[in-house]
Amino acid sequence: MSSATEPSPRGRVLTAVEEHNTRTGGSVTAAELAGRLGLHPSTVRFHLRRLVESGQIVEESGTLPTSSAGTGADSGDGRGRPRKQYLPAPCTPKDSLLAALVEALADSDSEREDRAAQAGRIWASTVTGQPTAPRDSDEPDDPLDAATRVLTALGFEVRETGSMLGTREIRVCSCPLRILGQHRPEVARGIQRGIVEQALAAYSGRPTDWKVTSRPDPRYGDCEVALRFNPATPAGSSPPATP
């Protein structure tokens, strides 16, 4: 499994949109991003669509000057054809409120992370407490499947999963907690950990077998959530499932 230090293509596209806006104050086209990042234009457009759908960037239409004709798929045809341009999504009052709530959680990073984990478990319980689709078996879910199932339902996009030497990892692409993680990484870690702990408690059948850690990458919006097999953990020592 790739390292969190290797950003996903979507994370690179998102960061490039933000950096262009910071540098120029303006929007950027898919063709410009493709040239800058060395990615195929179709790949860039795919990730831009997904970022628009997730609310992380906004799309606007502009008119290209006639002199730019023939320079690419986004460049118009010399007759002032509209082209799509992209900007970072503006911050909302909700972002400011969330930041204020985070400050009120606790005085230390460790306390904030623990309380954020509790919030993550409560958030995940809105999924685990709902009726689920019929299953083919009454056997508990695989831990990765359980975690992926709940993360996806809460709006996280799981890019890949993997297992190695007792560690099972989930790579999340363009995490919705990215902005929070830029300012309070301990809170983003705690929320992600709490979500997965609740998923394991609700669906895997043996939550105390696994120790959950999270490593967000706030610049690119990616993160890795690791589930490490912990056979020595006493039964009942992990946080209980939230009803």
Image (cartoon, grey):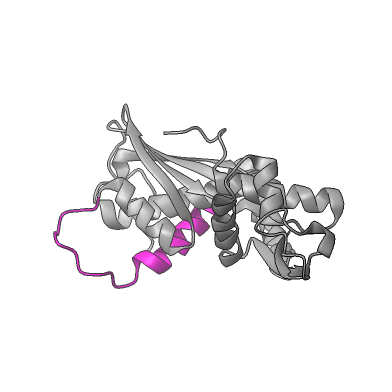
Please indicate, yes or no, whether residue 221 appears anywhere in the rendered image. Answer: no
Say if 194 sits above or below 1 in the image: below
Q: Is residue 184 magenta?
A: no
Quadrant location, the N terminus: top left
Q: Is residue 90 left or right of residue 56?
A: right
Q: Position of residue 149 (x, y in %)?
A: 35, 57
- Residue occupying the point 51% across, 49% down: 173
Tell me if I can see residue 29 in this picture: yes
Magenta-drawn stretch contains 140: yes
Task: Report x, y in % for residue 167.
Answer: 35, 33
Depth check: give the residue in front, 11 or 74.
74
76 or 161, which lies in front? 76
Q: Specify the segment rendered in magenta.
A: 116-141
Please, which residue is most extreme toward the bottom here? 131
Q: Is residue 95 above or below residue 204?
A: below
Residue situated furthest top in the rendering: 165
In which quarter of the view is residue 64 placed?
bottom right
Name the residue rendered at 42%, 63% in the picture: 153
**Viewed as shown, does residue 16 lie left or right of 133?**
right
Q: Name the residue located 29 percent from the left edge and 30 percent from the top edge.
A: 232
Tell me the residue at 46%/33% (across/down): 2
